Image (spheres, grey):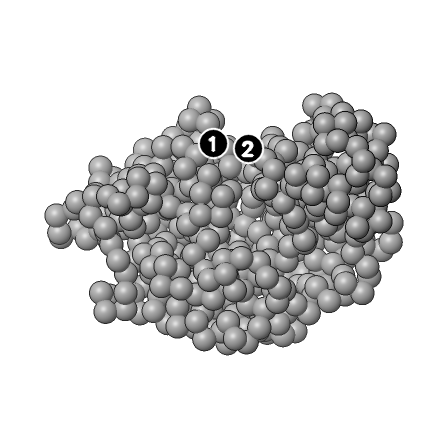
Amino acid sequence: MIPQRAQSARSLLFQPFPIGQGGLVLPNRIWLPAMVTWRGTEDGFVTPSVREIYLRYALGGAGMIVLEATGIRDVASGPLLRLSHERFVPGLKALRQEMRAVSASIVVPQIIDFLKIATRKPTRVFMEDAVRRGALAESVLDVSDAEFEAGLERYVQGPRLRHDFLYGYRQTIEDLSREEIRQIPGWFASAARRAKQAGFEGVELHFAHAYTMASFLSVTNGRTDDYGGSFPNRMRLPLEVIRAVREEAGTEFLVGCRYLGSEDIRGEDGQIRGNTLADAQAIGVELARAGLDFLSISRGGKFEDAKQPPIGEAMYPYTGHSGHTCIPRGKNDPFGVNAHLAAGIRQALRAAGFATPVVASGKIVTFDQAEGLLRAGQADLVGMARALLADPDLPLKWQAQADAKARACVFCPFCEQEDQRHRVVTCTLWPKDPADHRRRLTPAAWRPDAPWDPHEAFDATADDL
């Protein structure tokens, strides 16, 4: 039931919120979750476009801004930001300084490890590559593409290679050697140290969705050594990562994580598999016991039930059933659809004696929804991704009770389509570029004492601010 609107001065949403062990205080409980922007350089550096969007978020007034997924391995990964080497520190340090000059928001990068993934190859290219690697006999090249496709199970022995043909190659945690696994905590720790050098107040460890750490935590983890199978084994690497980060960055540095309240992987038989809320509650208690400063709860977004990609594209983990639970797209999907996961995890933490703050997210778009979650004790902090993408100024407008001037998310697929195609992520509600019907211009910063033009573009530079 939606509560009556409280005056913003008396609302829980706009109360300062202490977080971590270093005396940090969020100016409010509005949390911007990490969203990949595809604005970095091809080798992972901050660009003017990166500065533009994060300065824009800073001006909007969210209490916490989580910088997009930032890589910890020093490998080619396209226009994603990185903290995998000291060379990335100066650009991120300048960004943090600029944000601090205009906002009291706390800012932390989300640091991520991900495994190799390749695009789906045309049939002939796949055949030639497999022959070259010795995975298929050379005689297969005498078969036409159509014959190969029709007789796939005859020509391609083993489900793994058939999957690579149909979906594109994807490395899994079962492929990793113990030596490779042992490097991961050090990569996370070094990235956290660099984040501290860059002036960030902390880091968010990415333990969610289709990526390395979530795969170790999952009941689908198929390893047969002490990094798979039992619950303690599946917790082993995440706990090693947390210990390494703490040793490198210290106890006062804010360290939390984003992880899954449930995985919701739909199998070919229609059955839902993967971690459930009960699994997530047990994981949350252990993460709190390890000393994390916050737990941000997501859902789904797995490769295991992703749709087959077109030739020339890689799998996208938000296209299947689990992807829909991660990003509830339908206009008729309930608001706050995933809040029960945060509530269940928070309840388990409190029962175990931990006060670790919990962040809820998932189609939370109005003041009353956000305030209602806090008043009901379902969460301590409210994450809003698409709502703040549509209108970075929501915190300021809600605090000024200027809701009529808010730009409300319409739950269209525009931002997700841009992400899937590795284009700069924007919102269809932003002003259109007259020269490019698809490109959107960052909306002007809202000021209560100035006339508001929703079609005005905003180009953030240090001089402007």
Q: Are marks 2 and 1 in contact (CB under 8 Å)?
A: yes
The x and y percentages for residue 108 are 48, 62
Label 2 packing within 10 angstroms: few (<14), some (14-19), many (20+) = some
| Quadrant in the picture for the C terminus | bottom left
> In the displayed image of the protein, which residue is found farthest to the front?
142
Q: CA distance from mark 2 to mark 1?
A: 7 Å
Q: Which one is in front, 292 or 138?
A: 138
The x and y percentages for residue 297 are 56, 46
Task: Please tell me whether residue 353 is drawn above or below residue 364 in the rendered image.
Answer: below
Q: Is residue 20 visible?
A: no
Residue at 81% x, 35% y is 142
207 left or right, relative to 440: right
277 left or right, relative to 254: right
On the image, numbered disc 1 is attached to which residue? 329
184 left or right, relative to 338: right
What secondary structure is found at the residue carrying circle 1?
loop
The x and y percentages for residue 287 are 66, 55
Residue at 39% x, 68% y is 95
Residue at 86% x, 42% y is 137
On the image, numbered disc 2 is attached to which residue? 324
